[in-house]
Amino acid sequence: MEVTAAVLIILILAAVGMAGVKLIGHRDRVDESARRLVHAFSVARAMAIGNNTTYTVRIDSTHRNFWLDETSVTGETIAAKVIRPELFEQNVIIDKFIYGPITVNFEEVRPVRFFADGSSDDVTIQMRNNFDSASNPANIDTIRVYGPTGQCKLFLNERREPSASAVQLTQKTTVSQKATTSQKTAVTRKTTVTRKSTAR
């Protein structure tokens, strides 16, 4: 009787221990994927500032990977996959993808742009393990990309939503970026026309 009780206690403790190991494994995979995505954002911002152009991190939910393209301000590809694609860890998914205040459908490739002045799209990305409940905030890792500065912050085991003030600043920044690009294009065209006229 005592031997049976001892064996039963050992089995219960082993089961609890295995469940804990499995949970840690889930969390580690989500945390690692989130950290690698934050690193890609930081690299994109640094390259955008250093090369005075726009770089875009593209996130593909179907193939569960992400990569970096050199692009125009509006997102058209100039040089594809300047850094090779990286895979998310096993069973890690994007739970929510929020541009400013708008939650978008994540069944396609989503871009996050970083501009030459250090600003970016204002984005909130929530990640979790596919087997963990989305209703528990502790299962979520949140990545915030702050548009006006292009800086990223990772919140582990925490669901975060974008603030209204950050969204408004981002919208102003994006409009300003597009206006600056239009002005540069106009100056380039004017210079080209002047050179042609002079050549004649």
Image (tube, rainbow, N blue to C red):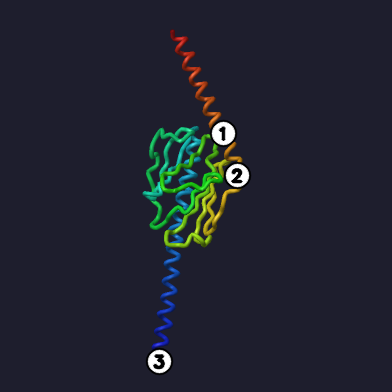
Count residues near mark 2 (Cα–Cα under 10 Å), then give few for <14, some for 14-19, many for 20+: some
Badge 1 element: helix
Residue ID at (47%, 41%): 44
Q: Which amino acid does label 2 sit on?
A: Ala
Q: Mark 2 to mark 3: distance in Å? A: 65 Å
Under tag 3, what secondary structure?
loop
In the rendered view, does 158 fall on the left or right side of 59?
right
The residue at which mark 3 appears reads as 1
Gap between marks 3 and 1 measured at Cα: 77 Å
Query: Which of these two is toward me, 51 or 200?
Result: 200
- Up-down: is 110 above or below 13? above
**Residue of label 2:** 166
| Spot occupied by residue 93 in the image (x, y as percentages of width and height) | 43, 54
Determine the residue positioned at 43% across, 79% down: 12
Residue 112 higher or lower than 194, as above or below: below
**Residue that numbered label 1 is attached to:** 175
Q: Foreground: 76 or 200?
A: 76
